[in-house]
Image (spheres, rainbow, N blue to C red):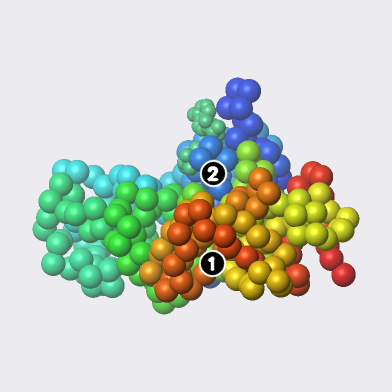
């Protein structure tokens, strides 16, 4: 039995359909990422599970128990918000222990669990401070600790890293991944950042306009996107989409997708594509070159030590077994 089951859930705000018959499930100990652009319904899904709002149709269960009539405090979940939502007048110690105090846990047990949680998150030296005296990363750890200490059936994370600078975001992302493994926690994690989704998720659900487009492992979604939306949303730089005749191929496809790493530099005589360099982006290990080919812009990955200047001619071939074919509606055509 899945730990959390979200079945055919619909949520409307007046005319706005925030979730349209959305279904997914989380297995025990799994980290599922909901990823999609702003406004696609990610936070709405979490708010419904937390019981902060009612839904119009569908069911949500945790451990087989229907949540619909359970008040938020009786749902065995803990939510970590983007803005952390710490109590500003309480110390870190009090913030961490608050939920246990509300449950009338004995004082000595609260103290030992606060200590244990603070050690695990390396914030034991901050217990007497108030949130106003903490950095963004430290607040984030306290917010995670406040959820962890309750040992809930399911953790809900709503963009917990998006207020942090880029370097800290990567550090805390790795810490969350480790924490997930060591606690064997069941986590539903929301982000609009596809890199975060690919690196953290056991599985990913890609959403758009209140609907799930595809659910699968990061590898599966990257290698076999079901449509052009998923194909271009997951992966950075995005997959190139071009008409098949640009590659001199006669294919039963409306558009062909090819990832930057599957376009290769070639000699002029072997090239399928010859174009003019528009821009170059160096990432250190690689360089991504964007060039124009008969009115179409494509990006390719090249070794960082090969310098291409704007305006220069570039010759490419592509790996034919790495092509993604899409029909006129943008739906993947299964090959073979
Ligand atoms: N209280 C509300 N009243 C009316 N519309 C709402 C309300 N809350 C959310 N919406 C709408 O529902 C849709 C989904 O919102 P939601 O907050 O779930 O998006 P999101 O995917 O979390 O986006 P973001 O990445 O920006 O946080 C949006 O179109 C939003 O404008
Ligand atoms: Mg949101």
Mark count: 2
Q: Residues within 10 Å of mark 2 (few under 14, many from 20)?
A: some
Task: Tell whether 226 sits left or right of 37.
Answer: right
Q: Is residue 13 visible?
A: yes
Q: Which mark is residue 141?
A: none
The x, y position of residue 90, in whole percent, is: 17, 48
Indicate which label's residue lies in the foreground, 2 or 1: 1
Residue corresponding to mark 1: 301
Which residue is located at x 60 percent, y 35 percent? 18
Q: Quadrant of the C terminus?
A: bottom right
Mark sitting earlier along the chain (2/1): 2
Determine whether the beta carbon of the residue marked 2 sits less than 8 angstroms from the nearest atom of ligand 1: yes
Q: Residues within 10 Å of mark 1 (few under 14, many from 20)?
A: many
Please give the name of the residue rendered at 54% of the width and 67% of the height, measured from the top-left corner: 301
Rounded to the nearest angstrom, the CA distance separating label 2 from label 1 is 25 Å
Residue 213 appears in the picture as rendered: no
Q: Pointer 2: what residue? A: 37
Q: x%, y% of residue 14?
A: 60, 22
Tell me residue 251's x, y (percent). Answer: 86, 58
Residue 291 placement (x, y as % from top left): 57, 55
Q: Element at badge 2?
A: loop
Which residue is depicted at the point 42% across and 50% down? 159
Q: Residue at left 80%, top 54%?
A: 245
Figure check: 20 above or below 238: above
Q: Could you tell me which secondary element the residue under label 1 belongs to?
A: strand
**Is there CB contact under 8 Å for labels 2 and 1?**
no
State left or right for residue 108 relative to residue 274: left
């Amino acid at each position: 039995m899945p730990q959390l089951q979200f079945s055919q859930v619909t949520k409307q705000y007046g005319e706005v359909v925030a979730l349209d018959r959305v279904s997914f499930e989380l297995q025990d100990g799994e980290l599922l990422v909901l990823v999609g652009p702003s406004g696609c319904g990610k936070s709405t899904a979490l708010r419904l599970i937390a019981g902060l709002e009612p839904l119009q149709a569908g069911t949500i269960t945790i451990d087989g128990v229907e949540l619909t009539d359970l008040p938020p405090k009786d749902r065995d979940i803990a939510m970590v918000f983007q803005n952390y939502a710490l109590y500003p007048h309480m110390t870190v110690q009090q913030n961490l222990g608050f939920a246990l105090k509300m449950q009338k846990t004995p004082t000595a047990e609260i103290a030992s669990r606060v200590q244990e949680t603070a050690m695990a998150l390396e914030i034991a030296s901050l217990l007497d401070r108030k949130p106003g005296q903490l950095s963004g990363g430290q607040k984030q750890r306290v917010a995670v600790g406040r959820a962890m200490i309750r040992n809930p059936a399911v953790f809900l994370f709503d963009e917990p890293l998006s207020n942090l600078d880029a370097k800290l975001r990567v550090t805390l992302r790795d810490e969350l991944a480790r924490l997930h493994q060591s606690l064997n926690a069941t986590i539903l994690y929301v982000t609009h950042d596809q890199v975060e989704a690919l690196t953290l998720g056991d599985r990913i659900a890609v959403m758009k306009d209140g609907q799930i487009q595809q659910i699968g492992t990061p590898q599966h979604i990257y290698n076999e996107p079901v449509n052009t939306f998923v194909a271009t949303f997951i992966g950075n730089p995005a997959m190139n989409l071009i008409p098949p005749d640009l590659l001199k191929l006669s294919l039963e496809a409306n558009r062909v997708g090819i990832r930057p790493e599957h376009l290769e530099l070639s000699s002029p005589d072997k090239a399928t594509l010859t174009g003019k360099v528009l821009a170059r982006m160096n990432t250190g290990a690689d360089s991504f070159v964007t060039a124009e080919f008969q009115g179409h812009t494509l990006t390719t990955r090249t070794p960082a030590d090969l310098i291409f200047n704007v305006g220069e001619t570039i010759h490419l071939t592509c790996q034919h077994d790495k092509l993604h074919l899409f029909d006129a509606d943008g739906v993947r055509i299964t090959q073979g």
